[in-house]
Image (tube, rainbow, N blue to C red):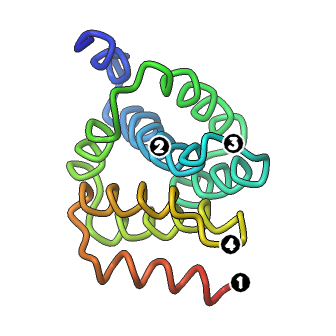
Amino acid sequence: MFERLKGVFAQEPISDVETENTTVPLAAAMLLLEVAWADHELEDRELEQVKVALESMYEIDQDQVAAIIDRARADHQNSTGVFPFTRLLNERLDRSERNALLVHLWRVANFEGDKEHYEEHVIRKITDLLYLNHSDFIAAKREVQNKN
């Protein structure tokens, strides 16, 4: 099982730039999709919000986003949880970048339009694993609610 988990990050990058351009967005995509899958349904609107989040956070084009999402969807079946992804993001992102990701997690969850306790639970767990505070959790949630 550990070998399967290592396989998610085992691709040898050519350079540090490639690592940042593929591994970090992949980890973020895994978290965004984890929120979208929390209710065991992946709706087109949720998937579109994942694409928007990746494009805006990492300034990557639509083809790269599609490839990252395809890989994340495939890797999700072998995933053992979100911890490896949050650990990587904690190592590579600063607090403000992790907070920006938290806002995008709420945007994915908010597409249902009503209170989705499954998504909220997943976001709360991810918030803790990203070493963000409860106040960050609430602020991100309110930011998304106020824009809708």
- Mark 3 and mark 4: Cα distance apart in space: 16 Å
Of residues 33 and 99, the one drawn nearer to the viewer in this rendering: 33
What amino acid is labelled 2 in the image?
Pro
Where residue 124 appears, as percent x and y from the top left, is 36, 63
Per the image, the residue denoted by label 1 is 148
Q: Residue at x 66, y 86 (%)?
A: 147
* Dot placed on the residue nearer the N-terminal end, 3 or 4: 3
Please identify the quarter of the rendering in which residue 115 is found: bottom right
Q: Residue at x 51, y 63 (%)?
A: 117
- Mark 3 and mark 2: Cα distance apart in space: 19 Å
Per the image, the residue denoted by label 2 is 25
Q: Which mark is residue 114?
A: 4
Where residue 78 appears, as percent x and y from the top left, is 43, 19
Secondary element at tag 2: helix
Q: Residue at x 49, y 78 (%)?
A: 141
* Dot placed on the residue nearer the N-terminal end, 1 or 3: 3
What amino acid is labelled 4 in the image?
Asp
Badge 1 crowding class, 10 Å Cα cut-off, few under 14, some 14 to 19, many 20 or more, is few
Badge nearest the viewer, 1 or 2: 1
Badge 2 crowding class, 10 Å Cα cut-off, few under 14, some 14 to 19, many 20 or more, is many
